[in-house]
Image (cartoon, rainbow, N blue to C red):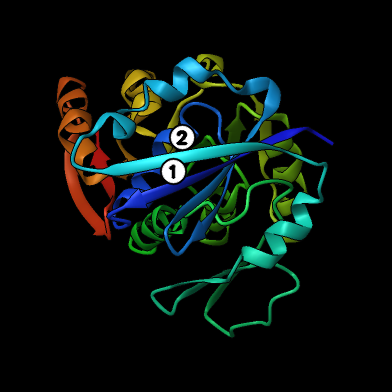
């Protein structure tokens, strides 16, 4: 088991800054969160923590928000058990259920069953919700699909359930690759899963690219996505806060992408673009 540090952040006002702080902490290596009545608990592997990176987090420097924190070393614990305590099923538009095996069947038209190896209570249900919500109105029939930063591969799995053809899932983390393989089998779909980044994309092109990541990675990688996106293809993005949209669209405009649909849920945003 990995050794972790637990940070207890007190946030005033709590909303919407708790979600935004989680998004910024993810960018510097934090991978798990639980929400408290007055802030969040955030977890990072001890070996990955760099104090200078935490000090540079934008939200911690905002004078309009009062954020304080303490931290402690955590004993080795069963993260799957902790995740089970904190994870609730996701219901998207009464059409799609995303749940674990230990949850009851919600009897919706579509169902995805996942069992993450790590991360619980990430607060990113809103971005998953937005991606699935957008995907409900997209045509995946026989399309080639890429899920970048796939995590649990819930998006790739749903694409296959919607009739997608060859579907590739890529993530930088080894545990995501292992988990994606297990989740694909759990949902009886076939995915091509590998460990890597956008730098690993070769000459293969795709009709649809899904990327629920974060602002900095998207800004860096959108040109690469466009280079492997077929003409007329679609790029679906999330992992974005409302204040990220202008910067993201600036890059998309440079790449000659057309914004087709924008959805917002709380402070989170999803953008559907077309080449």
Q: Confirm whether residue 258 shows in the render.
A: yes
Residue 192 x %, y %: 67, 36
Q: Quadrant of the N terminus?
A: top right
Task: Report the residue marked by disc 1.
Answer: 22
Q: Is residue 46 left or right of residue 132?
A: right
Q: CA gap, disc 1 to disc 2? A: 5 Å
Q: Is residue 64 left or right of residue 151?
A: left
- Crowd class of label 1 (few under 14; some 14 to 19; many from 20; radius 10 Å): many
Q: Would you identify the image quadrant in which residue 222 lies?
A: top left
Q: Answer above or below: position of 111 versus 258.
A: below
Q: Residue at x 53, y 35 (%)?
A: 149
Name the residue nearer the viewer: 127 or 96.
127
- Above/below status of 101 relative to 122: below
Residue 105 location, x and y as percent? 66, 82
Residue pointed to by mark 2? 25
The residue tagged with tag 1: helix, strand or loop? helix
Residue 188 visible within the image: no
Position of residue 53 in the picture relative to residue 116 (left or right): left
Query: Looking at the image, do the residues carrying marks 1 and 2 touch, with CB atoms under 8 Å apart?
Result: yes
Residue 92 x/y as whole percent: 43, 71
166, 115: nearer the viewer: 115
């Amino acid at each position: 088991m990995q050794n972790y540090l637990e940070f207890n952040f007190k946030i005033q006002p709590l909303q919407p800054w708790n979600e935004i702080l989680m998004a910024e902490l993810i960018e510097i290596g934090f991978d798990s969160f639980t929400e408290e009545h007055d802030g969040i608990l955030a977890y990072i592997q001890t070996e990955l923590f760099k104090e200078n990176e935490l000090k540079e987090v934008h939200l911690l420097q905002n004078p309009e928000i009062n954020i304080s924190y303490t931290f402690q070393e955590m004993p080795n614990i069963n993260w799957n058990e902790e995740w089970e305590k904190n994870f609730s099923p996701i219901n998207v538009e009464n059409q799609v259920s995303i749940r674990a095996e230990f949850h009851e069947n919600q009897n919706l038209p579509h169902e995805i069953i996942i069992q993450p190896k790590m991360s619980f209570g990430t607060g990113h249900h809103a971005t998953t919700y937005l991606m699935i919500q957008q995907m409900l109105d997209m045509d995946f029939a026989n399309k080639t699909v890429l899920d970048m930063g796939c995590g649990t591969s819930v998006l790739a799995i749903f694409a296959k359930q919607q009739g997608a053809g060859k579907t590739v899932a890529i993530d930088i983390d080894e545990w995501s690759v292992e988990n994606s393989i297990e989740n694909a089998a759990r949902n009886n779909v076939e995915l091509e899963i590998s460990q890597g980044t956008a730098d690993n994309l070769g000459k293969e092109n795709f009709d649809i690219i899904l990327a629920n990541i974060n602002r900095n990675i998207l800004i860096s990688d959108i040109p690469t996505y466009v280079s492997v996106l077929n003409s007329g293809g679609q790029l679906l993005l999330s992992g974005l806060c409302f204040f990220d949209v202008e910067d993201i669209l600036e890059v998309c405009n440079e790449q000659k992408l057309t914004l087709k649909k924008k959805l917002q849920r709380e402070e989170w945003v999803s953008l559907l673009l077309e080449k």
